Amino acid sequence: MAAATLLTPARTSPKPGTGPSRPAARAEQRTYVQTLMVLDTSIVVLAVLAGYLTRFGDRDPIGSQIPYVLVAPGLVLAWLVSLKAMRCYDDRVLGYGADEYRRVSTASLRLAGSVAILGYIFDVGVSRGFLAISFAFGTIGLEVARYAARKHLHRARIRGAGWSRRVLVVGDTAHVLELVHTLRREPYAGYHVVGACIPDALLAPVAQRLGDVPVVGSFRGIPEAAAAIGADTVAVTASGELTATRLRRLGWQLEGTGVDLVLAPALTDVAGPRIHTRPVAGLPLIHVEAPEFRGARKLVKGFVDRAAASVALTLLLPLLVVIALAIKLDSRGPVLFRQVRVGQGGEEFGVFKFRTMVVDADALLAELAARNETDGLLFKMRDDPRVTRVGRLLRKWSLDELPQLANVLFGQMSLVGPRPPLPSEVARYDGDVARRLLVKPGMTGLWQVSGRSDLSWEDGIRLDLYYVENWSLAADLTILWKTVGAVLNGRGAY
């Protein structure tokens, strides 16, 4: 799932040097894997049982070529073997990224195909209904269970608990600090920095710490440093002293120690589907695909946007009428609020919202400027006195944004995209920020599912730029799904 690689803003991360020791982390990893195995076994058994009972009831079919009371347990065993063969319990894919889900679905589909092919070759009439029900329920159940287990693990990691990798970061000071900052932005990914190794020449100037990261050695004693602090992963970032020969020798030195070697290139905020590795003459070349701003996928996105907007407006019409009446009865002024925003290519348009403030809200803004609770170019207040009673409820559940479905229908916005900026914001854009205007703004986006108004200006911009560079239809579906949870949660809406 491409969207599984999408970023979220910084969370509170455990301090360096704290957290479970390496033996404790390994024990937590084993417990997590064993839990997944129990879940998978239970789901596969229930799925096959559901397929059997749905297709045949509580009796084995009379006159069938094969005894299904024996086929069913065999299918369960084969399914579990297939999951193991696809390395669905490999710690390198568990807990983060789309590869875990992909392996689970691939294991199920390959087994289904193998059963069908074997049945055809040996002319065995295995019930298609039995197989279809079993594999449909089983595959969906496995994916849902993995998702639930992952969410539980993520919450534990954010609290500083749960199975995580203990990482020793190696590189020049600036690159070490950058990598540490990047890993801490996503503590749920499970990379907990416990120390750093830097070049010999820099050991004296930085004393014993690099920021709040303990400096535990130089490039000459990386394996020893990893063993001393109980690291199970060595993450190497950029440094002129770490030549190809030294990296190869480091890999040799780590063989048999149980410590993984990870290379972190100076390439950030690029989603996995855009990255392809190709070995050339023994050198792994990383190919980075250019962002897609036009083409067939863009046409599909536009069609889906307009079709979904038209259906949503039709279904939500009664709710829209009720909201309009509530606004009218609560305070004087129009029901809708139209505000100029900047869309794709810098083109201005009028965005529609239900009015949530008093009619003279703009005139009162100057008086409240000193109480701004965010940085950057936005104004945000948790208890903004300009917001009406009905408006506060509408904002909490994001119902004030439903009229933007009309903007989507008109082709001015997308269901998913960057936050639509004000002209005053765009006038002060500098450098990379203007890339937000390469795509249509969205009703929801990464900012919506990652904290909403609780985000800082920098986090909001980073998330928008990440979406612009890495958008995909799968990511859009993931964001739409997460938007439902963010809206129901109500956190960060004010």
Image (cartoon, rainbow, N blue to C red):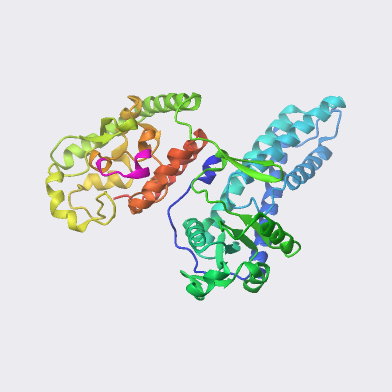
Residue 471 or residue 88, whichever sits in front = 471
**Residue at 71% of width from left, 45% of height from top?**
282
On the image, the x and y values in percent for residue 31 come to 67, 61
Asked whether residue 344 appears in the rendered view, the answer is: yes
Quarter of the rendering containing residue 198: bottom right
On the image, the x and y values in percent for residue 358 come to 15, 44
Magenta span of residues: 427-435
Overall secondary structure of the magenta section: helix
Give the left or right position of residue 268, taking residue 56 as reference. Answer: left
Give the left or right position of residue 379, taking residue 432 as reference. Answer: left
Q: How many marks?
A: 0
Residue 36 or residue 266, whichever sits in front = 266
Residue 390 or residue 51, whichever sits in front = 390
Relative to 79, does residue 246 appear above or below in the rendering? below
Residue 349 or residue 427, whichever sits in front = 427
On the image, the x and y values in percent for residue 266 come to 53, 51
Asked whether residue 17 appears in the rendered view, the answer is: no
Give the left or right position of residue 282, taking residue 446 as reference. Answer: right
Quadrant for the N terminus in the image: top right
Relative to 170, does residue 368 appear above or below in the rendering? above
